[in-house]
Amino acid sequence: MDLEFDRQHLWHPYTSMTNPLPVLGVTSASGCRLRLDDGRELIDGTSSWWSAIHGYSHQALVAAVQKQAAQLSHVMFGGLTHEAAIDLGKALLKLTPAGLSRVFFADSGSVAVEVAIKMAIQYWQGRGKAGKHKLLTVLGGYHGDTFAAMSVCDPNAGMHGMFGHLVAKQLFASAPRAGFDRPFCDDDIRELKTLLEREHDSIAAVIIEPILQGAGGLRFYSPDYLRALRALCDQYQVLLIADEIATGFGRTGKAFACEHAGITPDLLCLGKALTGGMLSLAATLCSDEVAAGIGDSPAGVFMHGPTFMANPLACAAASASLELFAKGDWQAQVSRIEAELKRGLDDASALPQVVDVRVLGAVGVIEMAGSIDTAFAMHAFAARGVWVRPFGRLIYVMPPYCISSAELAALTRAMVEVAALDGIL
Ligand code: PLP
């Protein structure tokens, strides 16, 4: 593989072209194994950023895409429709929390968030309250890299600071107090309540990652917080957007993280695992009421329409993935992974440079006392036969649900060993 060409000419996520991080060449992948061009095999701890929940090259997904490609690989969605989109729409509405009835197919998670934000703003225009156009969110959040999505990411995280003067100014409350099982009290949500009380006339929606703040710090929080937030949104007539792009499809132990709190958002963003990691597809779901408000807005139509909207290949992959999900034993797999992650990562708690170890569903996190040397850590992981990509102070994994107990034990062993290395920080 011409890694030198890659190094000189191809951008990778969040990297420099003038001082690139080393990359590994992958020639094929199956199950939860990545095969490298130098002959090595790595156990994947990332599901390719939360997406490959069934593992790589799952036969059912490959067959669905092949069949669809032979029939209709793409057609514009403006004025035309197709079976692959209709089947997926039906499957999604069956699986997602009751009350969501309209589906917009986008092509990436960030775009699904843009769509949700635009829908919320247009909804209030339709309800005669065009002044309600701001977003309220919490610190520690991450919602994507496009402009509206950046405006609701944590401004202190340093990811998008260089564009800070250009993104819309939104409202931020403190991050939810960390701890899934931590007892909740009204004080935990007081700041959000105060902002809603004071500013609700200008707020279109609250956007939040339910239960798990992902790229903003891998922190879990209480379902009671989410329940209280839903009640506040109802009280102050503000829409609730749940960004389940990372948490959707079983990752936290429920099909959707909102289910931990038994709530339905007004808008729901999905992506990543929607196609089981096969192809890029995302979706924004909304209620009848949101759709009706948009219909009543001066424009009368929702103003968004990507060229590859509802791409049939991606829809077919997603339907096959949802079918596996619906009839598979993901719940048993995720509970087993949760128990094994807890056991496997336990030893890390005693390490002096570790400040926290936490697990929920199929997500395991070791939080270090300082910033991790990413290149050093990735090299150390690859040398141990596993693929883990730490960021900031976090060593974390969210493996494919098909990972075996032996593979997961190798993964957690490597995490504890690497966390203990001199030079990791
Ligand atoms: N929202 C959340 C919660 C995410 O974790 C991500 C990606 O990590 C996004 C949105 C953006 O999705 P994408 O990278 O597909 O644009």
Image (cartoon, rainbow, N blue to C red):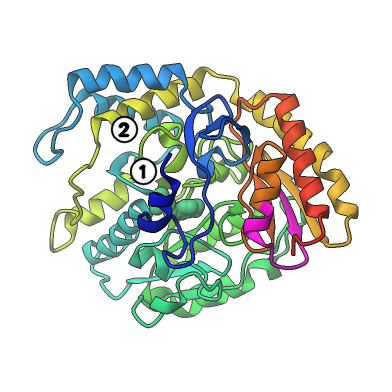
Whether ligand 1 has any atom under 8 Å from the Cβ at mark 1 is answered as yes
Is residue 95 positioned above or below 288 on the image? Answer: above
Q: Amino acid at mark 1?
A: Ala
Closer-to-camera residue (312/270): 312
In the structure shown, which secondary structural element does the residue marked by tag 1 occupy? strand
Q: Amino acid at mark 2?
A: Ala
Residue at image position (27%, 71%) is 129
In the structure shown, which secondary structural element does the residue marked by tag 2 occupy? helix
Task: Name the residue that disc number 2 marks.
Answer: 314
Is residue 374 located in the magenta-colored stretch of the structure? yes
- Is 168 left, or right, of 80 in this rendering? right
Q: Position of residue 94 (x, y in %)?
A: 41, 28
The N terminus - image quarter: top left
Residue 171 makes an appearance in the image: yes
Task: Name the residue that disc number 1 marks.
Answer: 282
The magenta stretch is 364-377
Residue at image position (34%, 61%) is 117
